[in-house]
Amino acid sequence: MDIPHLHDWPTTEAEAVALQNALAPRVDVTRPLERFEYVAGCDLAYHLTEPVAFAAVVVVRAADGAVVETRTVTREVTFPYVPGLLSFREVPALLSAFADLRRVPDAVMLDGQGVAHPRRFGLACHLGLWLGLPCLGCAKSWLVGDHGEPGGEAGAAGPLTVGGETVGAVVRSAAGAKPVYVSPGHNIDLASALAVVRATLSGYRHPTPTREAHLAGNVLRQAHAR
């Protein structure tokens, strides 16, 4: 798929924070998603000793979880790990994988945050602005906000709030599993982000799109280690 250039990549933490603050007002989390036949999941694995990332984008059919396309990329990581600045490590590699994608998905799901972020500009927001596609975060870890514990059944959810504003939801993705943290990233509203997550649950903590991407990234990492 064609990806228009959005910005040059910063090299320092201060530059990255400034760019997040400049781009955050462009994020749109008010749009309902009318349909999502195909959902792309994204994830990265990392080399244990080298600055190398193994990025995977897997497109699945939402109705049955069938994988219809997989793209993987191995790329050097040039930005350090800084909480809240994950996108500057991961988006460059993901863009390389998306550039090879033939099936343009209706929505993109990432193992990371959307607007549930200190500057309202998490990984799903950043990738969403680059791609121009509906993007949502479905993270395993909490970053910001207050929340209660959702019900025990798969699909149960409760609000994730920051300063009284609902920015996302805490979702029980599988019975007995720890919850995931869902927030819209760009070109999608919270209700639609929740609908995408619930439609792709399959008994695991990861919804199918990000689970398949996680597996594909690990396969690439293991192949690199041989």
Image (cartoon, grey):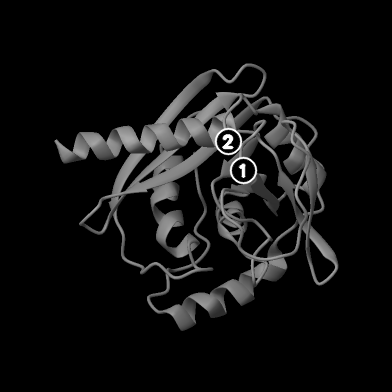
The residue lying at 70 percent from left, 30 percent from top is 36
- Tell me residue 198's x, y (percent): 72, 32
Count neighbours of disc 2 (C-alpha within 10 A) and say few if under 14, some if 14 to 19, many if 20 or more: many
Residue furthest to the right in view is 164
Distance CA(mark 1)–CA(mark 2)? 7 Å
Q: Amino acid at mark 2?
A: Arg
Could you tell me which secondary element the residue under label 2 belongs to?
Answer: loop
Judge the density around disc 1: few (<14), some (14-19), many (≥20) Cα neighbours within 10 Å: some
Q: Residue at x 68, y 60 (%)?
A: 115
Residue for point 36% across, 68% down: 79
Q: Which of the 4 quarters of the picture holds residue 206? A: top right
Q: Residue furthest bottom?
A: 14
Could you tell me if the residues under marks 1 and 2 are in contact, i.e. CB atoms within 8 Å? yes
Residue 44, x across and y down, in percent: 40, 46
- Quadrant for the C terminus in the image: top left
Circle 1 sits on which residue?
A: 178
Q: Is residue 104 visible?
A: no
Where residue 163 sits: x, y (%)?
A: 81, 72
Please report the residue visible at 21 percent of the width from the left and 34 percent of the height from the top.
Answer: 223
- Residue 116, image x, y percentages: 68, 61
- Name the amino acid, label 1: Lys
Note whether residue 217 is visible.
Answer: yes
**Up-down: is 44 above or below 145?**
above
Specify the label residue 205 is tagged with.
2
Position above or below: 114 against 79: above
Which of pointers 1 and 2 indicates the residue nearer the eye?
1
As drawn, is 17 to the left or to the right of 11?
right
